[in-house]
Amino acid sequence: MISVGVDVSKGKSTVCILKPYGEIVCSPFEVQHEEGAMEAFVGLLAKLDGEIRVVMEATGIYHLPVLTFLQDKGYFVSVINPFAMKKYAKDNSIRGAKTDKLDSMMIANYGIEKWYKLQKYEGDEETYAELKLLGRRYRYYMELHVKALQELTHILDYVMPDIKKMFNSWNEANGKDKLSDFVEKFWHYDLITSMNLEEFTEEYLSWAEEKKYHRSRSKAEAVYELACNGIPTLSSNTPSTKMLVQEAVSVLRAVDSSLALILARMQSLAKSLPEYSTVREMGGVGDVLAPKLIAEIGDVRRLHSAKALIAWAGIDPPPYESGQFIGSKRKITKRGSSTLRKVGYEVMRVLKSHPAPKDDAVYNYILKKEAEGKGKKHAKIAGLNKFLRIYYARVTEVYQ
C-alpha cells in the first residue's frame, strides 16, 4: 500500500510518497511537467514494491499533464475535489500551516486514510471532453459578446439614441444580428433624416429584402419618426463617427462568428451521441441548449444516481437538523458547476416562457411551486431539480 500525494501547480508538482502509519518512502520533491522529468518520476515509482495509488487535487487544467501521463503508464490515479481536500486538511491540521511540501504530505496521508474509498479517475470519452472544452470557450466568447454589444450600444447612444430598442441583436439560433446590419448601413440619424419618409421607406425595404428580413413598412416609419425626434450628440460630419460605429459592429461580428462556429461544432458532436435525441425532446431544450446541456453534464454513467447529478449542479439543499429542530428553509449549496446551473436555469426560463405541453411534468411542477407561494426564481430552481432527475433517468435508460 503506497500512496503518492501530488500537489499540482502550474508547470510543476510537489510529490510525497508514503506507506501506512506515516512511513515516508520519499520526502517531498519537485517534478517538472516535462517528459524527461515525468519519465524519471515514473521510473522511481516502478522501483517501489507494493500497490501504488496516486492522489491529486483537481486544479483546473494544471493537473491534466500529470494525470494523462500517469494514466497512459497504467497507474491508478484518483482526482480529489479541492473542497473535500480542504476540509480534510482543516480537520487534520492544528497550526494551519501551508506549503507545497506540507500539502503533498497531506494529500499522501489522505490517500492512505481513504485507500479503500479512492475512486479511479475515468477520463471522459473524447466526444464529451471536446464538448466540455467547446462549452467553456463558448461561455468565454459569450462574455466578449456582451461586452462588444455594450460598446456598440454606448456608441449608438451618441449617434442614434434609442435605436437599439427597435431591432433585435444577435440571435443564437440563426446567427442573425439585425441591429448590426442596420447601423452598418444607417450609422447616424442624419443619414435617415436627409431623406423624406417615402425615400427612407424604400431604402429600408430594399435593405430588408437584401438581408432577408421581414419587409415592414410600419417599422420603417417608426424608425424614421425616432430619427426625426432623436438628438444625436456626435455629429455625422466628425470623421471618426462612422469609423467608431463600424469598428464596433466589426468587433461584435467577429465575436459572433466565433460563437456560431463553436456552436455548430458542439451541435455536430452532440448529435453523434446516443442520448441527443432524448435530451432534445425534453421540454425547454432546443438546438442551442441541447449541446450546452450535454457538454456540462457529460456522461451520466459516471454518476451513481440522480442525486449525484443534482449535487454536481450545486442545487441540492443540504439537510440541517439539530435535536428536535429540522430546518425547512434551506438554500442551495452552489458547490458544483456554475455553468450547468446557468444552462439549466436558461432551460427553465425557456420552458416557462414558451407554450409547453399540458403533460410536461417539469412545467406543471414549476406552476405548482408558484401556486404554493414560491418566488418565480425559486420555482424555476425547484423545476431544474426535477428536470435533472428526469434527465438522469431518461439518458441512463438510453444506455441500458
Image (cartoon, grey):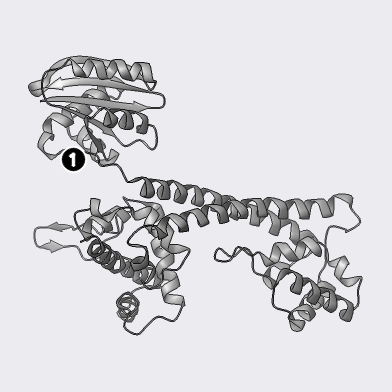
From the viewer's perspective, is 112 left or right of 64?
left
Q: In which quarter of the image is residue 395?
A: bottom left
Q: Is residue 342 visible?
A: no
**In the rendered image of this protein, does residue 154 appear above or below residue 105?**
below
Give the camera-side residue of 147 and 217.
Answer: 217
Amino acid, disc 1:
Gln
Q: In this view, does 336 lie to the left or right of 218?
A: left
Question: Measuring 89% from the left and 77% from the top, which residue is drawn there?
Answer: 199
Quadrant that contains the N terminus = top left
Return the x and y of residue 79 as percentages of the image width and height: 26, 37
Measured as percent of width and height from the top left, residue 144 is found at 59, 50
Residue located 57% across and 56% down the image: 260
Residue placed at 86% from the left, 70% from the top?
192
Is residue 246 toward the left or the right of residue 290 in the image?
Answer: right
Residue 5, quarter of picture: top left
Q: Can residue 153 be seen in this view?
A: yes
User: Measuring 32% from the left and 74% from the top, which residue is drawn there?
Assistant: 362
Query: Which residue is tagged 1?
Result: 119
Q: Does residue 345 sit above or below 245 in this rendering?
A: below
